[in-house]
Amino acid sequence: MQHAVEVIGLTKEFTRRKGRTRTRVRALDGVSFSLGRGECVAVLGQNGSGKSTLVRALSTLLIYDGGSATVFGHDVARDERAVRRIVNRVSVEASFFKRLSAFENLSYAARFYGLGRSQTRGRIPEILASVGFPVERAGAPMQDLSRGMQQKVALARALLTSPTLLLLDEPTTGLDPRSKREVQDFIRQVHAVHDTTTLLCTHDMAEAEALADRVGILHRGRLLALEDPAALRRRYGAATLEDAFFVATGRALEDDIEDDDEEAA
Amino acid sequence: MRTATGALRYQATALLGVVERNSYLVKRYGWWELAFFAWTVANTLTIVFIAKGVEANGGTLDVERETASLLIGAVIWSYLGIVFEILTETVAWERWEGTIEYTFMAPLPRAVHLLGMGAFAVLYGVLRTAALFAVVAIFFGLSFPDADFGAALLLLAVASISFVGVGMVTAVLPLISPEKGAQLGFIAQGLLLVVSGVYYPVDVMPGWMQAIATISPATYALEGIRAAVLDGAGVGAVWGDLWPLLVLGVVAIPAGLAVFRAGERYAKRTGSLKRNG
């Protein structure tokens, strides 16, 4: 059976500069896992554990040093264009042209995926409404929208291109509880209604448990375990995922290892 | 056949997406556009008045011809500067807005991406420059009865291709060095301004600067356009400026693309795609 995602022995190192000193930091250390079609897998890890590096590698934004990764049979390193057509991503930062409106940001982004005006004119308001975004604000500059609303537009942008693999890199971090719940509900809905495979990187235990079929623990670039939440708790003899994480890594999830986003030099 | 048509349609849609996005940005930064335009008009007037100033100070020169020559230099440089800047800022702008990863992970071929930036730059540059020329011409009441505007436009069109290519090369600098790349782009643009004979003949410069001028497309564009507009030189007469521009254009675009792709691979290997300077 073909996996939706198959990652084997993925390795990535970065050079970190501090003054004149250069050190090599291993962001991914032989990570291997697979995702079935339509499955939602959450990867738990502290800041700096390698979650963002993994997401970037799968979305063709990083060239990994070793190992292999395929998305629906397409090699991520060798067949970038095919992978890009079927993958989209929502990251912790909403990442938009801030003076442009939600409609304008979604409109040009859709063109990059080959969607013409006739396909997006009606589709954009429709998809914005489906994520709970007030459509009457679609013409307002992104900088005038709340963080929660911006994140909903980010979800809409990802779904507009009908990705078969959705990469979610801490999509609810920094959101107020209500926005967080709305975004989580929508992720659940996408998972239930569409045939989308989802990789969710988070450090929110409750989110992982609520949304994912299986949960993995990534620590210092190594994937320590990947099982359904109950099996994970059993494996570490823990009552909660939080305890399981602590037993597995010796650290609390809130502790930072290093800034995952500033790993390069 | 159907697949080829589909691929072509996709690439045309994606290219128009780049143009569409930049048009939205121009619209949303309308007051800044107005401010930049007013500044360019003021700057151009300041330069073009130099010839009248020299005469007023007792110098002897053909004021009308010098005024027209300076006007051509200022207007053409304004156009080429716009084309160059828009290409150069391809990466820097997106990194500043935080959208760079989303653009680079889209199935948008890099050639289409950069050529879309080039197409927008030419379109925007033509509109801005035409408006600039119209405003400045009102101040000086210049007429060009002998001008061969067809030859001048041909030279400008061919020079635009070279500038898009050179812009692609400098666009890669912020990818390689987020901290210093954008600054190096400005330095490159300044170097082209100095050596290309924008406001003076190239042969007044030291030999080493004249040597650099031979590889600047702006040198040939300005020489040829001045000959076409001031002396009425036709395509045959400006061939000496046209063929180097054609050669530079043919070399610059593939070279620019190759350099950009190499820079992108470097950024993806080192993780500097996202990193801010």
Image (cartoon, coloured by chain):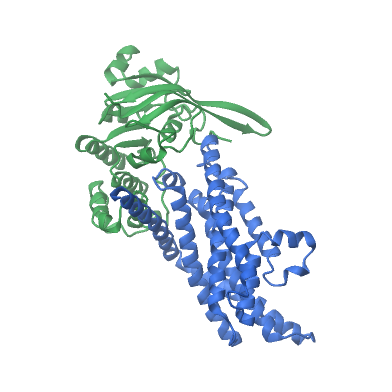
Q: Quadrant of the C terminus of chain A?
A: top right
The answer, for residue B255, to whether it is visible in the render is yes
Which residue occupies 64% across, 29% down? A22
Residue B241, given in percent of the width and then of the height, sits at 63, 68
Residue A253, given in percent of the width and then of the height, sits at 42, 25
Residue B2, given in percent of the width and then of the height, sits at 28, 50
Which of the two residues, A263 or B244, is positioned nearer the viewer here?
Answer: B244
Q: Quadrant of residue B16?
A: bottom left
Residue B18, given in percent of the width and then of the height, sits at 42, 56
Chain ID, green in image: A
Which residue occupies 32% across, 37% down? A166
Q: Quadrant of residue A181?
A: top left
Direction front: furthest residue: B236
Which residue occupies 29% across, 21% down? A229
Residue B137 is left or right of residue A197, and the answer is right
Residue A172 is left or right of residue B121, and the answer is left
The answer, for residue A106, to whether it is visible in the render is no
Which residue occupies 59% across, 73% down? B75
Q: Quadrant of the N terminus of chain A?
A: top left
Which of the two residues, A1 or B191, is positioned nearer the viewer here?
Answer: A1
Residue A71 is left or right of residue B30, and the answer is left
Chain ID, blue in image: B
Up the image or down, A190 lies above or below A50; here it is: below
